[in-house]
Image (tube, grey):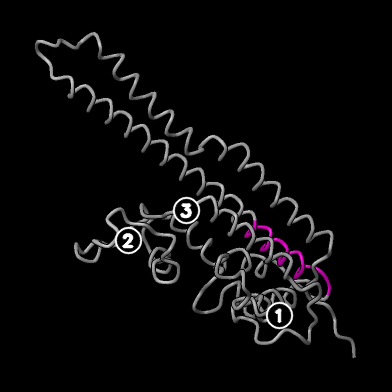
């Protein structure tokens, strides 16, 4: 009895996913993050302080003014510029991560759609839409559950925590406070940093999207997780290997089959 291949990851397709991802990350770091080196940020902040003193030098009257006021103003100008640049750097980091994560997710969904459209699946619009609209993680079975129904132990893979954390970080960056922030604080609190640190509990402070804290090393960790995922996708998934597919997929396929029967 034949055992048809239901999902297939061609070696060239796999290599393209990885190559394009690596190019995106390397170019983003080279073209964007290189503009936010710590020494450059501090140097620009210092120049802002010096500019403040130069602009206000003409207003200084030693008989009237205390020179310390002007130096405090320069320090404030320096600190403000430094903070603005740090916030911009952090936003660029999160933008880079969001960019490659969304590309990964879209590529994954499109690959699944392409596979279920060909023989022997030949599914229709309902299945295509279900794959595109189902969450990666859901209590009633998400996209990750579909992948695990292949017999692929994805959620215990060494790279999965970073992939999952990346998902939550991107959701918090996009949507702000909400369920993803709650999940991030419980499962991966290292990606949140409160300026009050240990005083948070004492003051009754709660986590906010503003407390996201991502480093250049995190970009590499998330990027490595994406690459390891593509390397780990099974080359061939046979019909006999798929066990307990999620209910949303079964319902979508049944809906497509019913439409076929009605048109025949």
Front-most of residues 19 and 256: 19
Q: Secondary structure at mark 2?
A: loop
Q: Mark 3, mark 2: which one is toward the viewer?
A: 3
* Residue shown at the point (32%, 33%) measured from the top left: 80
Q: Which quadrant of the view contains residue 125?
A: bottom right
Of mark 1 and mark 3, the one earlier in the sequence is 1
- The residue pinned by badge 3 equals 214
The percent coordinates of residue 211 (x first, y second) are 36, 54
- The residue pinned by badge 1 equals 150
Looking at the image, is 71 positioned above or below residue 198?
above
Q: Which quadrant of the view contains residue 116?
A: bottom right
Looking at the image, is 88 positioned above or below residue 190?
above
Q: Secondary structure at mark 3?
A: loop
Q: Is residue 253 left or right of residue 178?
A: right
Q: Is the C-beta separation of discs 2 and 1 under 8 Å?
A: no
Of mark 3 and mark 2, the one earlier in the sequence is 2
Marks 1/3: CA distance? 33 Å
Marks 3/2: CA distance? 15 Å
- The residue sitting at the bottom extreme is 1
The dominant secondary structure in magenta is: helix
Front-most of residues 50 and 26: 50
Q: Secondary structure at mark 1?
A: loop
Decide: few, some or many residues near mark 1? Use Cα within 10 Å; few <14, some 14-19, many ≥20.
Answer: many
- The residue pinned by badge 2 equals 207
The magenta stretch spans residue 207:
no
Decide: few, some or many residues near mark 3? Use Cα within 10 Å; few <14, some 14-19, many ≥20.
Answer: some
Q: Mark 1, mark 3: which one is toward the viewer?
A: 3
* Part of the protein shown in magenta: 104-119
Marks 2/1: CA distance? 37 Å
The magenta stretch spans residue 118:
yes
């Amino acid at each position: 009895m034949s055992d048809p291949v239901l999902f297939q990851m061609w070696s060239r397709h796999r290599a393209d996913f990885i190559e394009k991802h690596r190019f995106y990350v390397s170019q983003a770091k080279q073209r964007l993050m290189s503009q936010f080196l710590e020494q450059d940020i501090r140097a620009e902040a210092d120049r802002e302080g010096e500019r403040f003193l130069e602009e206000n030098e003409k207003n200084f009257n030693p008989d009237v003014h205390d020179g310390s006021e002007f130096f405090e103003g320069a320090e404030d100008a320096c600190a403000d510029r430094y903070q603005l640049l740090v916030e911009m750097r952090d936003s660029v980091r999160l933008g880079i991560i969001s960019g490659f994560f969304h590309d990964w997710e879209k590529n994954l969904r499109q690959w699944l759609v392409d596979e279920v459209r060909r023989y022997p699946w030949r599914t229709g619009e309902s299945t295509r839409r279900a794959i595109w609209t189902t969450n990666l993680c859901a209590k009633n079975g998400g996209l990750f559950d579909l992948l695990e129904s292949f017999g692929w132990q994805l959620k215990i893979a060494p790279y999965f925590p970073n992939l999952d954390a990346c998902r939550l970080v991107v959701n918090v960056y996009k949507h702000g406070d909400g369920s993803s922030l709650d999940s991030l604080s419980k499962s991966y609190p290292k990606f949140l940093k409160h300026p009050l640190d240990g005083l948070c509990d004492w003051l009754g402070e709660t986590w906010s999207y503003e407390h996201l804290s991502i480093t250049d090393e995190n970009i590499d960790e998330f990027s490595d997780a994406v690459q390891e995922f593509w390397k780990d996708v099974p080359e061939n998934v046979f019909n006999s290997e798929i066990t307990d597919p999620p209910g949303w997929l079964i319902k979508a396929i049944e809906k497509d089959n019913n439409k076929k029967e009605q048109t025949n």
